[in-house]
Amino acid sequence: MKAQQRITSLLDPNRPLLSVEFFPPKTEEAVARLSESASRLKQFQPDFVSVTYGAGGSTREKSARVCTLMKDQIGLNVMPHFTCVGASREELGQAIDDFHAEGYRNIMALRGDPPKDQTEFQVAPGGFKHASELVAFIRKRQPEICTGVAGYPEKHPEAASFETDLDHLKIKVDAGASFITTQLFFDNQHYYDFVEKTRARGIDLPIIPGLMPALATGQIKRITNMCGSKIPPALESELEKAEADPKAVAEIGSNWAREQLIDLMKNGVPGVHLYALNKAEVALELMKTFRARFA
Ligand SMILES: Cc1cc2nc3c(=O)[nH]c(=O)nc-3n(C[C@H](O)[C@H](O)[C@H](O)COP(=O)(O)OP(=O)(O)OC[C@H]3O[C@@H](n4cnc5c(N)ncnc54)[C@H](O)[C@@H]3O)c2cc1C
């Protein structure tokens, strides 16, 4: 097992972090494929990988299994995601103690999205309403654990305004977060503006941009509809023109992500988090581009 390192201890102004996000697959075959992909990605030395945590606790066991696989078998520094969905404080506390006992030293602390059968987030009996409460809880319960939180360059879809969303981000940061990872975006200007506005609010934590290549038109429209990120008209029209050819679509999406990555690296970001949708080839290409600049 690789010793799990706190992400704060890895941050270096001269060497941005490289991280990749995975989601727990549904089938045994897909878990085997993911394991193989993660082993291949290791050659590009991700500073950490993260594993999503599904709504309603439905994939809790699957998330835990993928985290263990990445940590113990592949030897990666792993940050499990963790949400407030469907759990009381006692249950959350037990899970946090378990993460710590299993060696994890980082948690992505989230409120979570409503489960599929619900339209709005419901607070679980004895649970938390906002991610900020989970951050404060983790800080108190297991102070050794470093917490990442989500930030939204194009505003969280439920927030009344960008300004109130920033107020809430400040609460989350003041509760003890260690760094911010952003929601995906396709126009880097959204990220740069977001960084400027958060700095003006007195938030000085590292803000790691999250990059997701658009690999399939239907999929990316579904994802952006849900998370509120916009597809720039230039990208949308290219994707639509190529719609009948899935390979061409994936190539357009990968090229767009590569251009975003190059621009972000030039502009001195503290790291890059790749939402690679469990697609090794795409992640490998982006990681190669990253490591060509930052060995
Ligand atoms: C990097 C990243 C990883 C993610 N991973 C997962 C995952 O693994 N599993 C999953 O289910 N989802 C995941 N998500 C999605 C996330 O759970 C949703 O975006 C969710 O709707 C909000 O989570 P949050 O942690 O940002 O919540 P919060 O920070 O609680 O914010 C949610 C909403 O409440 C508002 N708010 C916050 N605090 C207050 C307050 N004190 N008073 C009033 N309003 C407030 C905010 O403005 C916002 O509109 C991820 C998102 C990102 C960006």
Image (spheres, grey):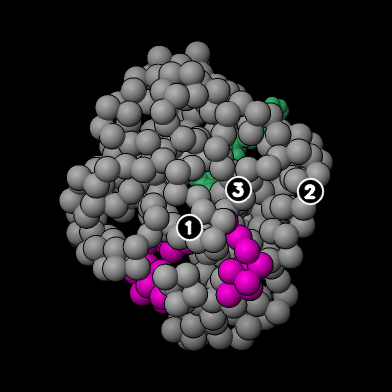
**Mark 1 vs 2: CB contact within 8 A:** no
Q: Which mark is residue 206?
A: 3
Q: Amino acid at mark 3?
A: Pro
Please tell me whether residue 265 belongs to the stretch shown in magenta.
yes
Check the image and report above or below for 193 versus 55. Answer: below
Depth check: 18 or 114 in front?
18
Image position, residue 231 (x, y; %): 67, 68
Which residue is painted at 29% across and 63% down in the image?
42
Say if residue 245 shows up in the picture.
yes
The residue wearing badge 2 is 197
Say if residue 249 shows up in the picture.
no
Depth check: 245 or 144 in front?
144
Q: Which mark is residue 17?
A: 1
Q: Which mark is residue 39?
A: none
Kindly report which numbered mark, 1 or 2, lies closer to the viewer in this rendering: 1
Query: Which residues, given as a range, are shown in magenta?
Result: 262-288
Give the alpha-carbon distance from disc 3 to disc 2, as whole Å.
13 Å
